[in-house]
């Protein structure tokens, strides 16, 4: 056999086989791509270009006015990239859009993308062919994209609607360059939720101070309740606990400085926060690292846990459980710590809203209609219509009519209104490179499972990580 | 996917070389050349454009601090800083690497042998073999993402099936399968094995079905028992299949991603190189340069088994 395959004689068959081998090499290296693929994937923008550019040309001639609202009367097109993929908010957006279409004669085409996917692909999406208007959050996350030139300045819209909002919301909508890029639609408070019936049956009092809170926790434990429900599988719920303890201990300015990297994570002030967190951890539900926030909420629904520090979206779980359960849900603000910062009554109250993209291919043609749409979203009536259908939020506009609010919403509006300082949330106020799954989420998960570790080394690890970014 | 090209090893180019051919005659007709050019050319173009292009791109980006916004050519070149920070400062790299190694070791020494065992057993079963095959193969049909979701539900602390069966759902005795960082990788590996075992089983079973029964009979005549027959006769003869299985297992371990990502985005004890790449590059985070450096490290690691496999395959082709 060997003599047949002498160097001179190359069989036709073996050449063809060589070709197959090369093809196989290509096949194998496809695995490399599967493993080593890190290129920016393009977002699945379904932005069907509805670039019917007839409207804007006719609009000025008919109305002649400068106001975007006037030109919108003649109709126009807007594309809207939405992350409202859950059924309830999706339906709310659809109805709000519907009303706008009827009022203005414009057409709004909504492209819904799964909430998490939308967030993961936001960079690629905004650089590709985004929709005219897109749903987004206030805070660092908004300022970042504005600073990268991926959002359009809407200061002119703000000059029309600015009087609807308090100063805090204007600050929350302003980029690093002092211009506005964001229209707030609603926000929701983080507070301590509980069931009125449980507190009534057991004779619990709302704790005003940290000591009261701890005493209540002990009492609940002796009554066989888990004092504080807790589920941190997604990594961010523990940030809410860290935030509120930090705000009570060190105040708003320290929070802002820490999130911006001006303050150090190795600061003894941070040590105090972690020590308080550590004192409270034994009152929290065990196994938090493997539990979703929804499962933790179930502990409160089923009266196995007494309290739960979370955003007001926890009420969705009660809504699903039934009207009676929802009526039974109440909350109180996080107890005061006896520091000078108690007076700030600060809390996390993240704002959701809308922005205008920069790279949308249809934006030039749709500009007037898009700004009219944003203006419409900034109206208190629109926002009230929104939060009536999704009562886990409250309208962002200060002049919103709260008479139709649920008791929980009224209380939330009161709580946020009373606050001197409002923060967005740890992962909305800081660099996403720092806050992500391989970042602050992981550090906090480590902490809640090993609260007795050397805090000095732990805080240094966090600061070292920040420094590498 | 490489499996197809390996099976046809031994009888190489014997038939074609019937006569001596003078050198100045081309062995190939014009049509042959065209076919060859298309066969090699088209995959090559795709290969270069879709695989090696991005690979080289990732390699180059790994020396920059590109944040995914604007052109990578405008990004600042920072030399090997990404690599330095990856190996010395980044707290998640070494855990991720060790988890990949654990993943590989588990699949190689537990899941794969189990799949082979199932294949051998099913090969002996006369009745109901099809039913068993279907049962074990069923998970392979599911995508790993779906498997991740299924098992996340089973492992859930209070609502999950497993803790409910064990009666460990109370606050003071529950087992935190997905949250405990020393436990969750094993929980994830069980989920991964659930699929992997069936995969290996089917491949091996196909090999066993093609196995020449006379060899087995000969071994029996020589007085070998079942175990000896398998390890001394069947296993060595099945070498081409064994190589495929080793390669598949290695690749499955290196590209492990879906289950860990579904469980908790690859944190808290489930860090893997692939999830680090995703969390740094393809997420709201925008450290594309840094993510590329992790991708390059993963590429280099992947090259070891791939080169070993290819060189072996080429050698067999030449023999």
Image (cartoon, rainbow, N blue to C red):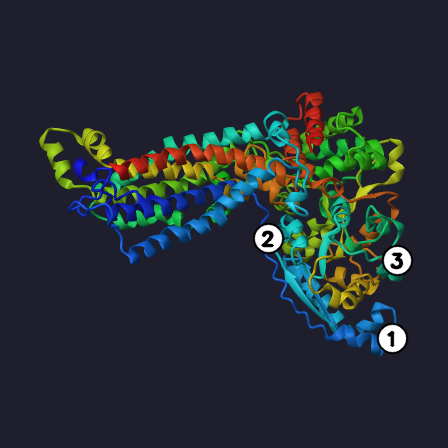
Crowding near pointer 2: few (<14 within 10 Å), some, many (20+)? some
Cα distance, mark 1 to mark 3? 24 Å
Question: Is A272 placed above or below A149 here?
Answer: above
Question: Is A358 placed above or below B90 here?
Answer: below
Residue B175 drawn at (x, y percent): 53, 34
Residue wearing tag 1: A64
Name the secondary structure under disc 3. helix
Residue B38 drawn at (x, y percent): 37, 55
Tag nearer the camera, 2 or 3:
2
Question: Is A34 placed above or below B97 here?
Answer: below
Residue B9 drawn at (x, y percent): 25, 41
Residue A424 visible within the image: yes
Residue B160 visible within the image: no
Cα distance, mark 2 to mark 1? 40 Å
Q: Nearer the viewer, residue A438 or A349?
A: A438
Checking the image for residue A162, the label placed there is 3
Give residue B244's quadrant in the image. top left
Q: Chain of mark 1?
A: A
Residue farthest to the bottom, as pictured: A62
Residue farthest to the left, as pictured: B221
Q: Please identify the quadrant where the C terminus of chain A is shown.
A: top right
Q: Nearer the viewer, residue A12 or A381?
A: A12
Name the secondary structure under disc 1. loop
Q: First in sequence: mark 1 or mark 3?
A: 1
Crowding near pointer 1: few (<14 within 10 Å), some, many (20+)? few
Checking the image for residue A42, the label placed there is 2
Q: How many marks?
A: 3
Q: Chain of mark 3?
A: A
| Residues marked 2 and 1, same chain | yes
Q: First in sequence: mark 2 or mark 3?
A: 2
């Amino acid at each position: 056999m060997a003599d047949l395959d002498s160097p001179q004689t190359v069989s036709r068959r073996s050449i063809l086989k060589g070709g197959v081998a090369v093809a196989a090499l290509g096949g194998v290296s496809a695995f490399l791509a599967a493993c080593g693929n890190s290129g920016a994937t393009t977002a699945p923008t379904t932005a069907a270009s509805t670039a019917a550019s007839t409207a804007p040309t006719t609009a000025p001639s008919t109305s002649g006015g400068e106001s975007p609202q006037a030109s919108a009367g003649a109709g126009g097109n807007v594309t809207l990239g939405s992350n409202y993929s859950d059924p309830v908010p999706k339906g709310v957006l659809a109805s709000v859009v519907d009303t706008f279409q009827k009022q203005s004669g414009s057409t709004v085409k909504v492209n819904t993308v799964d909430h998490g996917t939308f967030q993961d692909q936001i960079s690629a999406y905004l650089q590709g062919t985004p929709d005219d208007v897109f749903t987004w959050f206030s805070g660092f996350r908004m300022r970042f994209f504005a600073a990268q030139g991926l959002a359009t300045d809407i200061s002119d819209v703000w000059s029309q609607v600015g009087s609807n909002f308090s100063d805090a919301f204007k600050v929350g909508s302003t980029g690093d360059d002092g211009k506005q890029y964001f229209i707030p639609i609603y926000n929701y408070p983080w507070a301590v939720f509980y069931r009125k019936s449980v507190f009534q049956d057991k004779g619990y009092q709302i704790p005003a101070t940290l000591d009261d809170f701890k005493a209540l926790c002990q009492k609940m434990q002796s009554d066989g309740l888990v004092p504080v429900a807790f589920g941190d599988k997604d990594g961010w719920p523990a940030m809410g606990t860290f935030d509120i303890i930090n705000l009570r201990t060190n105040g708003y300015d320290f929070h802002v400085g820490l999130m911006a990297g001006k303050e150090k994570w190795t600061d003894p002030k941070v040590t105090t926060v972690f020590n308080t967190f550590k004192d409270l951890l034994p009152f929290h539900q065990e196994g938090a690292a493997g539990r979703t926030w929804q499962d933790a909420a179930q502990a409160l629904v089923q009266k196995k846990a007494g309290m739960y520090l979370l955003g007001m979206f926890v009420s969705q779980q009660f809504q699903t459980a039934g009207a009676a359960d929802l009526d039974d849900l109440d909350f109180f603000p996080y107890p005061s710590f006896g520091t000078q910062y108690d007076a700030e009554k600060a809390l996390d109250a993240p704002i959701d809203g809308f922005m205008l993209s920069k790279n949308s291919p249809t934006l030039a043609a749709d500009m007037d209609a898009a700004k009219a749409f944003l203006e419409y979203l900034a109206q208190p009536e629109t926002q009230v219509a929104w939060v009536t259908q999704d009562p886990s939020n409250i309208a962002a506009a200060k002049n919103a009519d709260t008479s139709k609010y649920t008791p929980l919403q009224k209380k939330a509006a009161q709580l946020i209104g009373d606050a001197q300082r409002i923060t967005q949330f740890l992962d909305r106020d800081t660099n996403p490179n720092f806050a992500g799954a391989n970042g602050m989420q992981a550090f906090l998960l480590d902490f809640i499972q090993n609260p007795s570790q050397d805090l000095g080394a732990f805080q240094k690890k966090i600061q070292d990580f920040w420094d590498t970014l | 996917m490489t499996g197809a090209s390996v099976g046809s090893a031994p009888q190489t180019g014997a038939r074609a070389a019937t006569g001596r051919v003078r050198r100045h005659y081309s062995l190939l007709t014009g049509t042959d050349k065209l076919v060859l050019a298309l066969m090699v050319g088209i995959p090559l173009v795709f290969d270069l454009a879709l695989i090696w292009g991005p690979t080289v791109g990732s390699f180059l980006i790994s020396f920059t601090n590109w944040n995914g916004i604007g052109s990578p050519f405008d990004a600042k070149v920072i030399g090997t800083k990404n690599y330095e920070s990856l190996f010395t400062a980044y707290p998640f790299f070494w855990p991720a690497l060790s988890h990949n190694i654990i993943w590989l070791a588990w699949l190689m020494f537990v899941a794969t042998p189990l799949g082979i065992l199932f294949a051998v057993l099913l090969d002996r079963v006369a009745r109901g073999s099809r039913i068993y095959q279907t049962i074990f193969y069923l998970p392979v049909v599911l995508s790993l993402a779906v498997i991740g979701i299924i098992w996340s539900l089973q492992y859930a602390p209070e609502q999950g099936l497993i803790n409910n069966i064990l009666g460990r759902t109370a606050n003071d005795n529950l087992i935190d399968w997905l949250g405990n960082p020393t436990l969750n990788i094993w929980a994830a590996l069980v989920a991964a094995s659930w699929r992997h075992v069936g995969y290996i089983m089917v491949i091996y079973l196909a090999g066993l079905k093609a196995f020449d029964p006379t060899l087995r009979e000969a071994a029996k005549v020589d007085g070998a028992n079942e175990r000896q027959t398998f390890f001394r006769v069947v296993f060595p003869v099945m070498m081409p299949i064994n190589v495929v299985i080793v390669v598949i297992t290695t690749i499955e371990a290196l590209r492990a991603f879906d289950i860990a990502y579904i469980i908790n985005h690859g944190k808290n004890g489930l860090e893997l190189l692939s999830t680090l790449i995703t969390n740094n590059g393809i997420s709201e985070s925008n450290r594309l340069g840094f993510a590329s450096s992790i991708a390059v490290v993963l590429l280099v690691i992947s090259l070891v088994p791939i080169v070993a496999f290819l060189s072996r395959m080429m050698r067999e082709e030449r023999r």
